[in-house]
Image: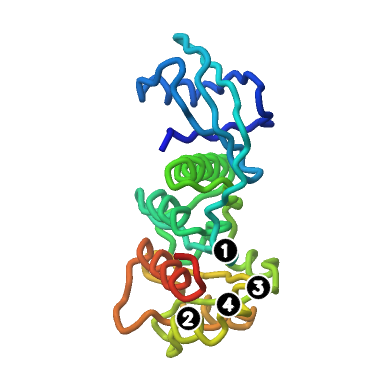
């Protein structure tokens, strides 16, 4: 498979396109040469075959080829509302969530979040996470970039989150199985989409879970084991893929 690169610009067959600086650096790191095949996508759907037409020390040109409408999206939309995790856990789970087909990511500030983000720091982290999404799409073959929303408090997000689709809260206090519920509502969830709410390290507080349930979230469980926050959402995504047809 030719290396894939995201470019935030229109792609037109037969055009010669100057590649953005980050892509030029990546081309050089990979030791690609003039005439090598690459793939370009801009997040608007599909991709374009391309050929490196010129490579300099600080620039590179690509000749854009034919459009390929093939997509690698799941047949259902899923939003991951994730309590902020500490260290590099948030980076890791966002990257893997993209590989598992997540449609959108909402980072949430919860009462037990180890990390506290606001203002410029929150904006910088959002931009960093969106760059991770881009890189993950380049790697896994997705042509549509999931959006990372600005960091929000759980309270504010619950008050404004869309009411459509299934709303699921992963909780050790729940008794219903995610797998059983997904199998029962397979067609409906494929049509309307799913929102997954996952707590941070230590989980959501009892008051936060009660607030989520009042907002229409249904508690679900993955079994008797307590999963780490960076594992929980990914396990849910994998379960949904297996039952709703994403694999």
Most distant residue in the front direction: 66
**Quadrant assignment for the N terminus:** top left
Most distant residue in the left direction: 225
The tag earlier along the polypeptide, 4 or 3, is 3
Q: Residue at x 57, y 47 (%)?
A: 145
Location of residue 80 with respect to 149 vertically, above or below: below
According to the picture, the residue beneath numbered tag 2 turns out to be 206
Marks 4 and 3 sit apart, C-alpha to C-alpha, by 23 Å
Marks 2 and 3 sit apart, C-alpha to C-alpha, by 31 Å
Mark 1, secondary structure of its residue: strand
The tag earlier along the polypeptide, 4 or 1, is 1
Marks 1 and 2 sit apart, C-alpha to C-alpha, by 22 Å
Per the rendering, the mark at residue 191 is 3
Marks 4 and 2 sit apart, C-alpha to C-alpha, by 10 Å
Location of residue 105 with respect to 31 vertically, above or below: below
The tag earlier along the polypeptide, 4 or 2, is 2
Report x, y in % for residue 11. 66, 31
Residue 186 lies in what quarter of the image? bottom right
The tag earlier along the polypeptide, 2 or 3, is 3
According to the picture, the residue beneath numbered tag 4 turns out to be 212
According to the picture, the residue beneath numbered tag 1 turns out to be 79
Pick the front one: 24 or 54: 54
Pick the front one: 70 or 174: 70
Q: Residue at x 41, y 17 (%)?
A: 33
Marks 1 and 3 sit apart, C-alpha to C-alpha, by 14 Å
Q: Residue at x 37, y 61 (%)?
A: 230
**Quadrant assignment for the C terminus:** bottom left
Residue 86 lies in what quarter of the image? bottom left
- Pointer 4 and pointer 2: residues touching (CB < 8 Å)? no
Location of residue 95 with respect to 173 vertically, above or below: above
């Amino acid at each position: 498979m030719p290396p894939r690169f995201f470019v935030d610009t229109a792609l037109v067959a037969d055009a010669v396109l100057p590649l953005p600086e980050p892509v030029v650096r990546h081309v050089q790191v990979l030791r690609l040469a003039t005439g090598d095949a690459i793939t370009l996508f801009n997040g608007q759907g599909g991709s374009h075959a391309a050929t490196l037409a010129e490579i300099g020390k600080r620039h590179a040109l690509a000749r854009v080829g034919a459009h390929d409408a093939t997509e690698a999206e799941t047949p259902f939309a899923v939003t991951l509302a994730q309590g902020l995790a500490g260290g590099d856990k948030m980076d890791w789970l966002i990257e893997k969530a993209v590989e598992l087909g997540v449609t959108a990511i909402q980072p949430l500030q919860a009462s037990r979040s180890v990390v506290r983000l606001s203002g410029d720091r929150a904006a910088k982290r959002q931009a960093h996470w969106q760059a991770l999404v881009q890189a993950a799409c380049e790697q896994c073959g997705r042509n549509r970039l999931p959006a990372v929303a600005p960091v929000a408090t759980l309270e504010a997000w619950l008050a404004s989150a869309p009411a459509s689709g299934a709303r699921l809260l992963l909780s050790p206090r729940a008794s219903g199985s995610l797998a059983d519920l997904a199998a029962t509502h397979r067609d409906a969830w494929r049509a309307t989409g799913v929102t997954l709410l996952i707590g941070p390290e230590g989980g959501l507080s009892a008051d936060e879970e009660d607030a989520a349930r009042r907002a229409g979230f249904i508690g679900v469980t993955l079994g008797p084991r307590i999963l780490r926050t960076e594992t929980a959402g990914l396990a849910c995504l994998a379960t949904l893929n297996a039952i709703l047809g994403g694999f």
